[in-house]
Amino acid sequence: MSEVQQNAPNTETQRDGPRDSIYIGKKPLMAYVTSTLIQLANQPTVTIKARGLSIGRAVDVSQIILKRMENAGYTIGDVRIGSETLQAEDGRTRNVSTIEIEVKKA
C-alpha cells in the first residue's frame, strides 16, 4: 500500500454519523430540496451549505422549502456567511464566499 492510501481518511466512518448538512453543487435544484426534506423528516434542523457560484442555488433551495411547504411549518434559523481561502490550480490563493442556511421544523 502506498503512503497516500494509508494516510487517507476512512470515508465509510465519516458518512456513518448524523447527516445534518446538505452540500449544494451542480445537481438539479429539486434534488437538493428533496434531500433536505428527507433529512428534516428525521432531524429537527438541517444546514444547507454552499460556496462560490452555488450560493444562489442554496438560497433557492431554502426558499422553495419555506414557500411550497408552508403547511409543514419549516422556518429559517441562523444564516452564516463567510469566506474560505483556497489554493487555485495556478498556485495563487483566492477567497471564495460561503453560506450556511439553517432550516428548522417549527
Image: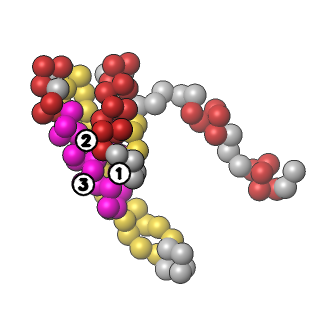
Real-space CA distance between mark 1 and mark 2, rounded to the nearest whole angstrom:
11 Å
Q: Given this view, does label 1 or label 2 mark the residue nearer the observer?
A: 2
Which of the 4 quarters of the picture holds residue 75? top left
Residue named by callout 3: 56
Asked whether disc 1 touches disc 3, contact meaning CB atoms under 8 Å apart, the reply is no
- Say which amino acid is labelled 3: Gly
Which label number is shown at residue 50?
Answer: 1
Can residue 76 be seen from the camera position used here?
A: no
- Say which amino acid is labelled 1: Ala
Asked whether disc 2 touches disc 3, contact meaning CB atoms under 8 Å apart, the reply is no
Left or right of 30, for residue 69: left
> Quadrant location of the C terminus?
top left
- The answer to if 89 sits in the magenta stretch is no
- Say which amino acid is labelled 2: Val
SS class of the residue under badge 1?
strand
Which of the 4 quarters of the picture holds residue 95? bottom left
Residue named by callout 2: 61
Left or right of 6, for residue 52: left
Left or right of 85, for residue 53: left
The residue at 30%/44% (across/down) is 29
Mainly helix, strand or loop, the magenta region?
Answer: helix
Real-space CA distance between mark 1 and mark 3, rounded to the nearest whole angstrom:
9 Å
The residue at 12%/25% (across/down) is 70
Real-space CA distance between mark 2 and mark 3, rounded to the nearest whole angstrom:
9 Å
Can residue 67 be seen from the camera position used here?
A: yes
Q: Earlier in the sequence, mark 1 or mark 3?
A: 1
- The answer to if 60 sits in the magenta stretch is yes
Residue range highlighted in magenta: 47-65
Q: Tell me residue 105's x, y (percent).
A: 23, 22
Question: Which of these two is toward me, 35 or 92?
Answer: 35
